[in-house]
Amino acid sequence: MATPSSTQWNAIAALVSVKLNRDNYLLWISQLELVIESQELIQFIDGTFPAPSKTIVKDGKIEVNPEFAIWKRSDRLALSSIKATVSELVLR
């Protein structure tokens, strides 16, 4: 699994030249899709990489699954990337 950096969303927002508003969906989505796919975040949006279990059993004890933490960070990065390219009016 790719593990995008926490600052990657800034780069994504910079690569999408317009913020989504009620009049520019086709332009916005055409830019956003290319950037999201190039950053290997599409799998978190289209559901092809579902969340792993939150916990695992290790040596008879229940522990936090480190794979879940990695997945969650990347999933949140994908969501943040989308929100960073949407106008404030649309976010309301």
Image (cartoon, rainbow, N blue to C red):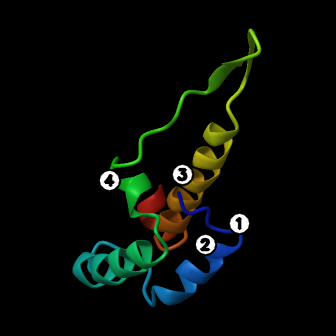
Q: Is residue 15 above or below residue 82?
A: below
Q: CA distance from mark 2 to mark 1?
A: 7 Å
Quarter assignment of residue 27: bottom left
First in sequence, mark 2 or 4: give its number. Answer: 2
The image's mark for residue 75 is 3
Percent x, y for residue 87?
Answer: 47, 72
The label on residue 9 is 2
Give the mark nearest the N terminus, 4 or 1. 1
User: Alpha carbon of mark 3 to alpha carbon of mark 1: how far?
Assistant: 11 Å
Q: Amino acid at mark 3?
A: Asp
* Residue under the image location 64 percent in, 78 percent down: 10
Residue in the foreground of this view, choosing between 60 and 23? 60
- Find disc 1 in the rendering and name its residue: 6
Secondary structure at badge 4 equals: loop
On screen, residue 81 versus residue 65, left or right, reads left
Contact check, label 4 and label 1, Cβ < 8 Å: no
Q: Which residue is mark 4?
A: 46
Picture coordinates of residue 22, whole percent (x, y): 29, 72
